[in-house]
Image: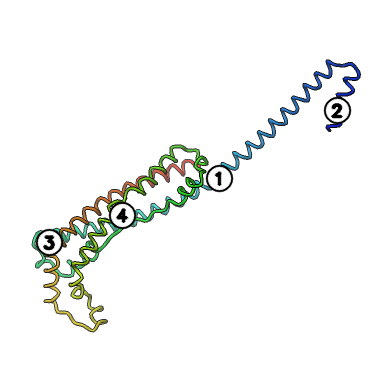
């Protein structure tokens, strides 16, 4: 092809057909430019197609992450509501001097599922973190969605500062209650250890433990912290729902 163009140019020049030569050269230039433009268009199309495929894979992965987050948050919030309800009931019993009028089984149940419980949802954010750390954040074209993901990631990192204090309260309460734990065993546990505990001993232990003002103070503090975490995890659930809705809208 190159040899053909060269011969054609030589023929036009030797024939003193300069005007035709100029037209022919212009045609060559146009063909070259068109070839470059077509090549660039194809290349851009390939790149756009690649980015769209990457974005589709990313959206699917993000959707799976936040479906899982929604499940974990719902489960944790349900448990946490129950824990706070039991803790508040135990606080009410202690502060209203009802320790000797409420059944021991009820009080110990409130202790086990309220005072002794601690919940926090362990959420998934690996897809978004991987995208950001790899410098491929531009794959996600929806700026609104990207902003929502950044806000969620920031809240996830900074929103559980009170975890340590809540755990410290739980540890402190456990240290106070350890001397009494042997009296709070169920019948099966007593039989497995080969011991028998009288109802009177259980009643005395229940009264002594829950009359301890330090135990009550730690329980009140922990319950307040847990109530704040419950509200915070509700906020994360709202963010999760909004992100899932935006992802699904983007996938349509």
Q: CA distance from mark 2 to mark 4?
A: 79 Å
Q: Which residue is depicted at the point 52% across and 43% down?
A: 136
Q: Which residue is depicted at the point 66% across and 33% down?
A: 40
Q: Nearer the viewer, mark 1 or mark 4?
A: 1
Q: Nearer the viewer, mark 1 or mark 2?
A: 2
Judge whether 192 appears above or below 161 on screen. below
Kindly check if marks 1 and 4 are in contact, taking CB atoms under 8 A apart as contact: no
Circle 3 is placed at which residue position?
Answer: 213
Judge whether 113 appears above or below 14 on screen. below
Compare residues 152 and 13 and report the one nearer the observer.
13
Callout 2 secondary element: helix
Q: Which residue is depicted at the point 12% across and 69% down?
A: 208
Kindly check if marks 3 and 4 are in contact, taking CB atoms under 8 A apart as contact: no
**Image mark count:** 4
Q: Is residue 125 left or right of residue 35?
A: left
Kindly check if marks 1 and 2 are in contact, taking CB atoms under 8 A apart as contact: no
Of mark 1 and mark 2, the one earlier in the sequence is: 2
Compare residues 203 and 44 and report the one nearer the observer.
44
Compare residues 252 and 140 and report the one nearer the observer.
140
Q: CA distance from mark 1 to mark 3?
A: 59 Å
Callout 1 secondary element: helix
Q: CA distance from mark 1 to mark 2?
A: 45 Å
Circle 1 is placed at which residue position?
Answer: 54
Callout 4 secondary element: helix
Of mark 2 and mark 4, the one earlier in the sequence is: 2
Circle 2 is placed at which residue position?
Answer: 6
Q: CA distance from mark 1 to mark 4?
A: 34 Å
Of mark 2 and mark 3, the one earlier in the sequence is: 2
Circle 4 is placed at which residue position?
Answer: 77
């Amino acid at each position: 092809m190159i040899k053909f163009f060269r011969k054609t140019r030589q023929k036009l020049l030797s024939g003193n057909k300069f005007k035709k030569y100029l037209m022919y050269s212009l045609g060559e230039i146009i063909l070259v430019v068109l070839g470059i433009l077509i090549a660039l268009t194809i290349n851009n199309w390939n790149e756009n197609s690649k980015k769209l495929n990457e974005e589709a894979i990313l959206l699917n992965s993000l959707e799976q992450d936040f479906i899982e987050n929604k499940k974990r948050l719902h489960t944790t919030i349900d448990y946490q509501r129950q824990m706070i309800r039991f803790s508040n009931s135990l606080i009410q019993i202690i502060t209203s001097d009802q320790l000797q009028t409420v059944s021991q089984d009820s009080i110990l149940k409130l202790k086990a599922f309220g005072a002794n419980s601690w919940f926090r949802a362990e959420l998934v954010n690996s897809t978004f973190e991987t995208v950001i750390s790899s410098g491929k954040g531009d794959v996600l074209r929806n700026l609104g969605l990207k902003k929502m993901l950044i806000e969620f990631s920031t809240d996830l990192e900074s929103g559980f500062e009170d975890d340590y204090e809540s755990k410290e309260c739980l540890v402190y309460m456990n240290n106070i209650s350890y001397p009494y734990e042997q009296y709070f065993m169920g019948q099966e546990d007593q039989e497995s250890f080969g011991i028998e505990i009288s109802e009177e001993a259980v009643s005395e232990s229940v009264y002594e433990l829950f009359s301890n003002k330090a135990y009550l103070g730690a329980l009140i503090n922990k319950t307040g912290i847990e109530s704040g975490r419950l509200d915070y995890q509700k906020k994360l659930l709202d963010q999760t729902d909004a992100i899932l809705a935006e992802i699904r809208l983007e996938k349509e």
